[in-house]
Amino acid sequence: MSTTTAQAGTPGAGQDAVVPKAQDDGAGPDRRRRDRLSRHNLAGWLFSTPFLVLFLTFMAFPIVATLLMSFTDFGLRNVTDPLSAQFVGLDNYTKLFQDDKFVKALFNTGYFVILGVPLTIGSGLAAAVLLNSGIDRLRTFFRVGFYAPVVTAIVAVAVIWRFVLDPSEGLIAGLGHQLGIQTPDFLGSETLAMPSLIMMAVWRNMGSAMVLFLAGLQAIPTEVREAARIDGAGIFQEFRRITVPLLRPTMLYVAVMTTIGFLNVFEEPFVMTDGGPNDSTLTISLHMYREGFDFFHMGYASAMAYVLFVIVLAITTLQLRLLKDKTS
C-alpha cells in the first residue's frame, strides 16, 4: 500500500515508466506484424500486377464495354468518339428475335451442338476404352494419331477436308468415280453441308475427349474392377456399373468444355462454307462477326454476343446439375 502510494505520488517518473511499456506490449508487435504483412502483400501484388493489368485490359474492360455497347447504336461513326453513341435500351435485343438470319443461325448452332457434342463424347469415350483395355500393340501410335488433329491448325484441317469433300477432284469423288458412283456436292448442298461440318468437328475434337477419358479410366482402381468380376459382372455390366459412374466427373468436364466449344463454332463454317449455301451453315458466331466487322453494327453484334453468353451459361448450369458427382 505504501509502495503504491509512493508511485502515485511521483507522477512524472511513474507515468514515464508505464507508457513506453504499454506501447511495447500493444502497438509494437501489431506494427511489426502489419509491417511483415505489408511486405508479404507487396510481394504478392508485385507478382500479381502483370496478370491483373492484362486481365483488366483484355478481359474485364472488353466485357463491360461490350455490355454497355449492346444498349447503344454504336457503329463506325462512333469509333473516334464512343460517347456519341445513342442509348437505345433493349432495341438491339428485341430486334434480334425479329431477324430471320439470327433465328436461322440460332437453329444451325443448336443443330451443330445437339448432333456434334454426343458424337464427340461417344467417339472419344470409345477410343479411350479401346486404348485402355482392348489394344496393347501400337497404343502410342493410336494415341498420337487421334490427338494429332487437335493440335493442327483449323485452317489446315479445313483445307484438307475441302480437298476430301471437293465434288470434282476430291478424295471421295475420286473413289466414287473409280467405283462408278456419282458422289454428291457435300459442301454445296443445303442438306449435307452442316452434317459435313459436324463430321469434321467431331474428327478434330474427339482426340481431346479421348485423352481426358483415358486419364479418367486409368484413375479407376483395379481392385474395384476385380471385385466386380469376382461378383460375376460381365464386360457391359462392369462398364455400366463401374466405369460410367466413376467417370462421371470426367464426363461432366468433357461435356461442359465440348458444349461451350461447339456453341462458339466459327472457324469451320467461316473457312469451309462462309455460312452457305443459303445460310444453311450460318452460326451465331459467324453472324456476329459479319454484323460487327463487315457492317460495323457493333451495338447489334454486342447484343448477339450477350444472348450467346446467356445460352452458354444456361446450358452449362443445366449440365452441372444433371451430371455432377452425387457420390460425394
Image (cartoon, rainbow, N blue to C red):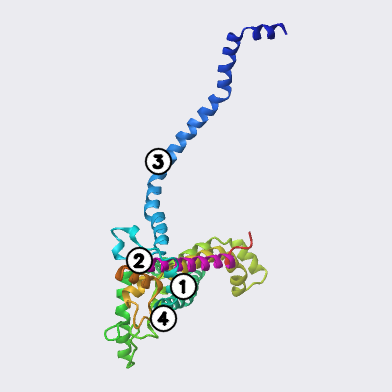
Q: What amino acid is found at the position of numbered circle 1 in the picture?
A: Thr
Q: What amino acid is found at the position of numbered circle 2 in the picture?
A: Met
Using the numbered discs, state the Cα–Cα distance from disc 1 to disc 3 in whole angstroms.
43 Å
Residue 67 to residue 50: above or below: below
Q: Which residue is mark 4?
A: 195
Query: Residue 196: percent from the left, percent from the top?
Result: 38, 80
User: Which is nearer the N-term, disc 1 or disc 2?
Assistant: 1
User: Which is nearer the N-term, disc 3 or disc 2?
Assistant: 3
How many numbered marks does the figure carry? 4
Residue 311 in the magenta stretch? The answer is yes
Q: Residues at badges 2 and 4 in contact (C-beta under 8 Å)?
A: no
Using the numbered discs, state the Cα–Cα distance from disc 2 to disc 4 in whole angstroms.
31 Å
Residue 67 marker: none
Using the numbered discs, state the Cα–Cα distance from disc 1 to disc 2 in whole angstroms.
33 Å
> What span is colored magenta in the figure?
297-322
Using the numbered discs, state the Cα–Cα distance from disc 3 to disc 2 in whole angstroms.
36 Å
Q: Quadrant of residue 174?
A: bottom left
Residue 276 to residue 265: above or below: below
Q: Which residue is mark 1?
A: 120
Q: Nearer the viewer, residue 287 or 159?
A: 287
Front of the two marks 4 and 1: 4
Q: What amino acid is found at the position of numbered circle 4 in the picture?
A: Pro
Q: Quadrant of the C terminus?
A: bottom right
User: Which is nearer the N-term, disc 1 or disc 3?
Assistant: 3
Q: Nearer the viewer, residue 237 or 323?
A: 323
Q: Which residue is mark 3?
A: 46
Q: Residues at badges 3 and 2 in contact (C-beta under 8 Å)?
A: no
Q: Say which residue appears at 38% left-offset and 79% top-offset.
A: 281
Front of the two marks 2 and 4: 2
Q: Which residue is mark 2?
A: 298
Query: Residue 133: percent from the left, percent from the top?
Result: 51, 69
